[in-house]
Image (cartoon, rainbow, N blue to C red):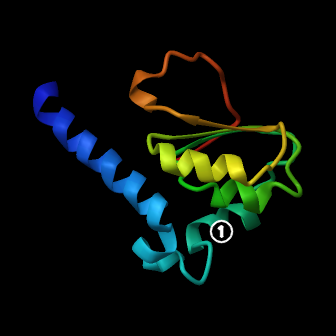
Amino acid sequence: MSEEIGPSIDNLIKFYDQSYTVGEEKVFTILADSPGQEITFIVENYDFKDKSILEVGCGSGRFASMISNSFTGDYVGIDFSESAIAICCQRNLGERFQFQTSDLHKSESDKKFDFIIA
């Protein structure tokens, strides 16, 4: 079964890498004018002040950027797109924000988080 899934995952990773390389706003047109209703809702309705957050599929770090001014906890953002993580790292959000190219299914971390956003 994993042999059937492998090429599909590889193609998905390539798609996202290319999308972030050319500019996500050119590929994901819903992002062109706003951060998105889901992100705005989460930021407006939850207090992340001293919490730990894992964001699975963090993309280019839009959510992390939105909370960076008021956030005092620990944040880990993972994405399987190296291009997306490169954009996240360029945002320079501070040492509380860690970004990693990773596949959640292969993670062996036992770290606990107050919030997991996917």
Q: Nearer the viewer, residue 13 or 36?
A: 13
Q: How many marks?
A: 1
Q: Check the image and report above or below for 43 versus 50.
A: below
What's under tag 1, amino acid-wise? Answer: Phe
Q: Which residue occupies 44% across, 79% down?
A: 29
Q: Residue furthest bottom?
A: 33
Q: Is residue 43 visible?
A: yes
Residue 1 can be seen, yes or no: no
Q: Position of residue 101 (x, y in %)?
A: 52, 35
The residue at the far front in this view is 22
Answer left or right for 94 relative to 5: right
Q: Quadrant of residue 40?
A: bottom right
Q: Residue at x 53, y 51 (%)?
A: 84
Q: Residue at x 48, y 22 (%)?
A: 107
SS label for mark 1: helix
From the viewer's perspective, is residue 70 above or below residue 75? below
Please state the horizontal and vertical placement of residue 79, each as a whole percent of the image.
Answer: 50, 42
Q: Position of residue 71 (x, y in %)?
A: 85, 49
Residue 114 higher or lower than 87, as above or below: above
Residue picked out by circle 1: 41
